[in-house]
Structure formats: C-alpha cells, structure tokens
Amino acid sequence: MTAILTHTQAEKALIGALDGATGWRAHLREATQRDGLPTRRNEFWKWSDLRRAANDVSGVGRLDVTGLDGLTNVKDGDRIELAVAASAGASAADAALVVPAGASVTLVETLKGAAGSLGNWHMTIRLEAGARLDRVVITDHDADAVFVGSAEIELAETATLNQTMVDTGARLSRNETHVTHPGQGASITMGGAYVLAAGRHADTTNLVHHTGPGGVTQQLVKGAVASGGHGVFQGKFIVDRAAQQTDARMTHRALMLGERAEIDAKPELEIYADDVQCAHGNALGTLDETALFYMRQRGLPKARARALLIESYLAEPLDRVQDEALRERLKASLRARLGALI
Amino acid sequence: MLKINNLHNKVETQDGEEKAILKGLSLEVPAGEVHAIMGPNGSGKSTLSYVLTGRDGYEVTDGEMAFLGEELGELAPEERAALGLYLSFQYPVEIPGVPTITFLKEALNAQRATRGEEEVSAPEFMKLIREKAKQLNVSMDMLKRPVNVGFSGGEKKRMEILQALVLEPKFLILDETDSGLDIDALKIVSDGVNALRSPERGMLVITHYQRLLDHITPDVVHVMADGRIVKSGGPELAHELEAEGYDKFIGEAA
C-alpha cells in the first residue's frame, strides 16, 4: 500500500521556492515533493521533527547570502566570511568551495533565521591534497526560526579539516556535516558547543566516512541546556575495510541546567576494518553543586558562579579554534546567551 | 565576634531520611582569639563549618548564629563571605577551566562590590598576589593553572591559605587543614595561618588531631561530641585528648 502524502503549507512553500532549481536545490525539491519534510518516523530525524517544527511556516521566503565572492579564486591565507540570512517563509541556497592543494583557508558562516523562516543552507566543500580548512559555523537565530544547515565535505590525502560550530538553537536548528575521510595523512578535528534556553532546539548531526588507511578524527561536542531546551547529538563514524589503522574518537558531553532540560544523544561506530582505534563517549551531567558552593563561599554571586562554571565547561571545544580573535568571538556569543538563561 | 547559641540542624541522608547533627551547640569566639574544635569523626565538626557558611542542605532548624552582630541564617553564602567569613575546605574543590588567578580576582572584586567598595585594578591585584604567593612558596605558574586541578593534597591546602591571605577575611574557619599535609607543608601552611592572626580577626580551627595545634596555638580548645560542645579549656586540653582519647568526653555527652 502506498500512503498518499498531503503536503503541508511549509512543504508547498519550499517546493514553490525551489521551482526550476538545479543541483543540490533540485534534490531538496524532489525529496520534499516525494517524502515531505522529515519527521521523527525517519530514524535520521527522530529527535528533530522538521515537519512539525515548520508547521507555521508559509509562503516563499528569501535566503540572502553575502560574501559569496570569496568562494572564487581561493588562495592560501584567505578568510571567507559568509552571512546567511533567512527571511520568514521557506527558502534554500547552496554554495561550493574548493580549497586548492597546499592552501590554508578560514571559512566563517553566520546563520541567521528570522521568525517564521524555514531556511535551508548547504555547502559543498572539497579540500585538495595538503589543503587546510578552518571552518566555523555560528548560529544566531530567532527563537521562532527553523533552520537546517548542512555540508558535504570531501578531503584529499594529507588535507586537514578543523571545524567548530556554536549553536544557540532556534525553534529547530540543525547542523549536519557529512565528511569523506581518505586517511593517508588526512586528519579531521570537529566539534562545537551548544547553549540552549527554554524553547530552543539544536541538533548536531555528523557522519564521518573513513575510506582509506591511517585516518585521524577527533570530535568533541559539548552542550548546556536549560529547562525547556532540547539538545540533540547524532554522531556516526563509518570505517571501511580499507581504512585500517584509523584513529577516530568521538565525545559528546552535556550539562542539564534544569529538571526539564532534554538531551538526546546517539553516538555510533560502524567498523569494517579490524586494526583500528575507535572510541566514543557520551556523558550527561548537572552543574557540580560542591564547586558552586566553593565559588560562592569565596564571594562570587550564584549567577556569576554558575556562568563561570558553564563557560569553562564549554570552552574546551572552542579552544581548538586557532585564530584568537575568532575564538574570542565564539566565546562571547556563548557568554551573551548564557547570561540570559542563568 | 562569632556567637553561636543553641544551634540545631538536620541534614538529609542518602536514603532521604532527616538526621539531626548539631544538637544545641553554643560557642563564642571573640575577635583576636583562635579557638580549636576537636572531636571524633561524626561529631558534627564539618557540618558546623557548612552551617556557618550557608551550604545548601545545611539549614538551621533552631538556635542562632551571629557574626559581628548580624544574624547569618538568612544570608546567602556569598553574603556571608562578603561579611568576612572564610572557610578553608577539608577537600578543596577542583574547577577545571578557570585559572586560579582569574578566580581569585573575581572573588576579591565580587566581595568588594557586595561591600560597596571599589574594584581592585589588574596591576594592583598582580602586586598583591605576587607578594602573598611568595609568602607561601607558590609559583606564578601554579596560579595560572585551573583552581586546584592537578594539585597535590598539600598544594591544595597551601592554595586555600593563599586565597585567605588575598581575600583578608575577618574570620577563618579551618576545616581539617592538616589532613594530607607532610611536615614541611604543615609548617608552611601554619606560618601562613599565623601571619593572619591579628587582634581584629577570629579563627575556628577544626581538627581531629592535636598535631596542627603545635603550630597554631589556640587560646581555647573545645571538645565536640554528638553535635554539642562538651568541654572547653586551654591549650592543655588538646594534649589531654591526645593522651587519653575522646572516650571519656563522649560519655559526658550522653
């Protein structure tokens, strides 16, 4: 029996927005036409029901991207800043980046969804041999935005990817990264931090596919979620039979700041090689009450003590950003959000 | 300076039952004096330190405790700290990611802000902490490390006293400060504590053994058993306890 799909107004709007689209946008149009927006019945979206979150979205919106010029004639030392802004309504855009052999490039994407938006943003990235990409994604969404950012990244041998995301959530914010890792001197560091106030949802979903021998992958994601916030972490490492001697480590740790905080995590390893070092760790906890008392006994007000503890907890993945000014910018954006939820 | 009268408290045990710990404790420490509290394990010594400093779960059920004329019961831990109460922890807490020097500067300025005093500037603070660190043989490298992370037991206790030297509280509670110290560290820590003795400052030294009191000579020694002070006397009482044990006093408490 084939179920007949009735499109929601958001789905109709997205299909309409993608009329005549090509490439990735055409795929998105076909998928939406065929299956609708993903719901929790889709295993890959089980904690982020996009169809439901986008329920109130209607009409065609705009996804404005500034800084696209930076993606052409890329050379060593470039720093590319893309500002991606979704207006109310459904919209989608994509872009591509090739980091030439041996070049070292920084890419900063700022994602901003307005109230009533359903924004879809996709990057296709290729790192040639010996290239290095420092990719930073910062979200700054309205509490009533729905936004899905995704990237398909392919590394050549001896390429290096260092990716850091800071997500402060939205009605639904999802950042999805798929990486093809050839091993052979290539290495990946990926991580990030999320801070979620009540009513905000952030989903970090990553897939790293190790296809060749000797690859190194380090992933560290940390979060802090207030009562009424919802954090999702889905991490998956696939290690092919050919990817012997892969060294891949995935860690997700999060703080529940209130009794009604919700955090779902699914770390997965799918290993077909027999000589690898792979590990995953996942830990949820609450703020250390003894440390809080200790700090207050020394005179710090409760709110300041809590903020300092959370900030220091989240700092670790951000400390992997090498550019100091950029690192401070990320920390400042988290600090600003922290102030509001303590 | 510190006046405690008929103090009672209860704590919740791990199986959710309420248990009385302090059962009518009375004690007075005038400014300029050092009082020691000795007692067997489980007599309520550490509980007293937490009740005085306002830890969650250590609320007073009956009695009074006043510091400099102000009733402490309703005050938050940070307000008590700003009044000048300082607890040197038996087990100093590790705070990963927060450098000791940053923490101390924040603490000092937070206390000053609560008291309506001006902030200490960064250069002034650096001068202050250099001077105090030297006194306790603490290197600047140690101060840059996160609070208590990776420190030995002795180093942690030294850092507790260093923090007291910087914050200059009016009253110190030392909870088992001698535990985990070797002889050399005990001497450094005691010298630090003795440097803090002054006619304006009071101290309560909680200890299980008399050893610490050879270095920090108390004016008064109290024996605590079953949540109350059962005997008070001069420094010689500590020696008596060391020689004869706590048994005869525990009998008196019953």
Image (spheres, coloured by chain):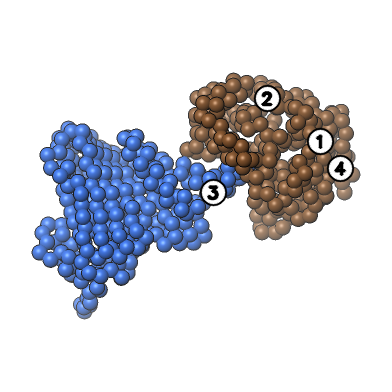
Residue in the image at 49% along x and 61% along y: A260
Above or below for B55 versus A113: above
> Disc 1 or 4, which lies upstream in sequence?
1
Above or below for B247 versus B158: below
Q: How far apart are marks 1 and 4 (CA)?
A: 19 Å
Mark in the foreground, 2 or 4: 2
Q: Residue B3 vs residue B134: left or right?
A: right
Q: Residue B71 vs residue A315: left or right?
A: right
Discs 4 and 3 lie in a common subunit: no
Residue indicated by mark 4: B230
Discs 1 and 3 lie in a common subunit: no
Q: Dot 3 falls on which chain?
A: A
Q: What element carries label 1?
A: loop
Residue in the image at 28% along x and 49% along y: A110
Quarter of the picture containing the N terminus of chain B is top right
Callouts 2 and 3 close, C-beta under 8 Å: no
Instruction: Using a 10 Å C-alpha cutoff, classify the residue at mark 2 as few (fewer than 14 neighbours), some (14 to 19) or many (20 or more).
Output: some
Residue indicated by mark 2: B192
- Is residue B70 visible from the viewing direction of this image? yes
Task: Tell me the amino acid under the disc marked 4.
Answer: Val
Q: How far apart are marks 4 and 3 (CA)?
A: 40 Å
Q: Nearer the viewer, residue A317 or A339?
A: A339
Q: Is mark 2 on a helix, strand or loop?
A: helix
Instruction: Using a 10 Å C-alpha cutoff, classify the residue at mark 3 as few (fewer than 14 neighbours), some (14 to 19) or many (20 or more).
Output: some
Q: Pinpoint residue B130: horizontal percent, then vertical percent.
A: 56, 23
Q: Distance between the residues labelled 2 and 1?
A: 21 Å
> Disc 2 or 1, which lies upstream in sequence?
1
Mark in the foreground, 4 or 3: 3
Task: Tell me the amino acid under the disc marked 3.
Answer: Ala
Q: Colour of chain A?
A: blue
Callouts 1 and 4 close, C-beta under 8 Å: no
